[in-house]
Amino acid sequence: MKALPTLFLLTGIASAQVYTPPAPVAPKAAPDTTMERPKEEKAKSPYGEEIPMLDPSAETITIGGVTIPLGDNRILKARFEKYLSQPPEDTGAASEYRATIKEILSTISPLRQEGPNLVQAFKKLPSAGTYPGDANICGSLAEAIYVAMLAKKDVNGLKLLNDSIEQEKQRIMKEGDWAARHETDKSLGDVKKPGQGGQGGQGGQPTQNRPAENPGAGTQSLQYANTLRRIAEIEALKKANIARTEVQTVQTKAQYQVNMIQWFVQRRYEHVLMAARFYNQIWKDGDSTLRIDKNSDVAKLFSQSVGVNPTVSSLDSLSNEAIREVDKYIDAFDLMLSRNELHSASQRLMEAYALGEYLEPVATLSLDKKQRVAAYVRDLHELYGTLQARDYTKAKELATRLKTNARDFPSSKVDSAIAGYSLASDLAIEEAKAHLLSKNNDKASEKIKAATEIWPTNPKLDEFRKMISNAGPMVVARNDFDRLIAEGNFREIFKRQYELAPAIQGDAGREDAFKQVISNLTKIEASLGKAAEFSKMGQKYAAYEQLAELRTTFPDDPKLGRELELLAPNVANFTMALERARQFEERTPKQTGSALSWYLKARNIFPQSKFAEEGVKRSVKEILPKDSSSVSSGAAE
């Protein structure tokens, strides 16, 4: 099977095909009053703008000036549809969980009459974390508080350590000061008796004592130097402990704040409120700045929307604002639903769900209300799909049902789209009929194609199809010929030539294409017949060369290629020799001697080989460029 790719290496670049279409000519512009379907742009509906859908187009929601990304709309839409089919979270466990959350917020609130109680509120977190809907976030909050308290205890220990070493420093300093003031030079400490003279004094006066200045005593002693060194060590240790205290405090706050930001982005606003109030009780230093990278998306979320750096207080405020907004959305939803304004109600519910999926008003909404919205949303999505598919019959039925169920359904764009494109398709079909009656089949084909693109399921297309079938087989045959030419199915044209020839008579372009196809395939069939005769006589090499030479001219004929594939295994040694010769001949620099050797080997395998003979002549001409024609045959022998 090594010879299979050799065929294409020998043939080189194809010089022709079974049918070579003429060069395209720019068509002349002709006046046309038919309403053509406008070119579509990706992600747009047939009538220019999308139907107002429940998923927010910006994939964001704004709370108090802060824009929160909601993620992929497709994911949000799928989650919203799942929410509409779920029963409300109004079980006893859910009610107990929400009561626990409210109790924790009340216990840790700064407005509590007895004051916030951190320990009592902390003890309630584990019980709240056992509820499945909490996702154990209360447990994570309890762990964060525990880690913060341990870090704070360590910081307090460092402060006590600094106090103790400060006391040691003060004691050492007092001792050193006393020694510096009272330790005197013993050599000057003798006092003379009255009346005695000498160095110490005159007339019996006592000698004055002075601080010791000799090495080993006073400020010159090793003990005094050690006192100064110990004071310096204590100062360095104090500074190191202070720095360690500040770093540990910053790290602990940052770790705690990461959880708060994550819960805020996840729209767990009640947990953000609890975390903020615990934060203010753990750290009472007034520092509430969020320690986040100023180039991060979270920092930009605040700075680009509000223009200030985010703080724990801002998270607390935004969470309260989000909770209030969700309550307002649900109130608006109930009011609109009571008025049978399903379109606006579904949008308000979608906004409430996107903003506060886990809040009580959204989670406890009754299943009956959600089912009404679910039915409307399902029909709305189906309407959108039918418009994208240009099924205006089904779209009209859905639009009628939506207008019946929702008094505020925005039907103007839908109705205008259905009416406009239905009319355009009908007009195109009528013009196609007129062109067909006037025997202008090309124009009729263009118009019916335009009508099909505008409205593929137009019932009038069936009428036109019946009209075509009643017009006789000539039109069908002509259309089949055009289709076969476009598909490149020239064998089918050759097979049906006596059926198709009368249908294209009188059309110069089609006749020229038909003649090319029939002439070339007749030539191919003749060569295939000769090759078959060679094969029957056992001359496989001659059959192969007969077809391989023809393949260079008609590389697109499948039958010719299949016959060559069947012959290839039987002539593998011959094609391999030709391939090796070609490789040596095309190398840089050329290895003409090796190429000639392989061409001669191929000729020994098949002495009548045209490919081998031409290769030998080229090689000899390279070796003996002068008078190569006279010696080529002798060299070959």
Image (spheres, rainbow, N blue to C red):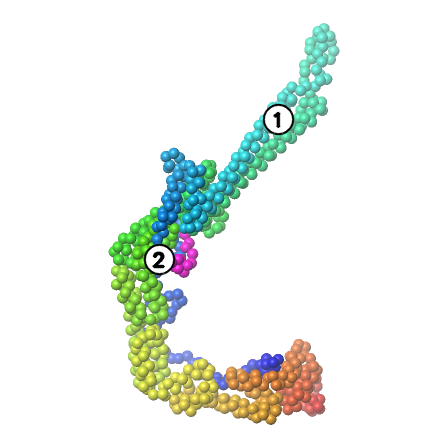
Query: Which disc, if any, is residue 172?
Result: 1
What is the spatial separation of the Cα atoms under label 1 and label 2, in whole angstroms?
76 Å
Q: Is residue 34 visible?
A: no
Image quarter of the C terminus: bottom right
Q: Label 1 neighbourhood size at 10 Å, few (<14), some (14-19), many (20+)?
A: some
Left-right relation of 602 to 279: right
Which amino acid type is shown beneath numbered disc 2?
Leu
Query: Which disc, if any, is residue 84?
Result: 2
Query: Which disc, if any, is residue 604?
Result: none
418 or 210, which lies in front?
A: 418
Occupied quadrant, residue 506: bottom left
498 or 12, which lies in front?
A: 498
Residue 11 in percent (x, y) is at 58, 83
Q: Label 2 neighbourhood size at 10 Å, few (<14), some (14-19), many (20+)?
A: many
Residue found at x 38% / y 58%: 82
Residue found at x 52% / y 85%: 559
Residue found at x 38% / y 54%: 354
Q: Is residue 28 magenta?
A: no
Occupied quadrant, residue 275: top left
Q: Is residue 70 magenta?
A: yes
Which amino acid type is shown beneath numbered disc 1?
Ile
Residue lying furthest front: 92
Left-right relation of 542 to 80: right
Which range of residues does the magenta coloring cover? 68-82
The total of numbered circles placed on residues is 2
Residue 450 in percent (x, y) is at 35, 76
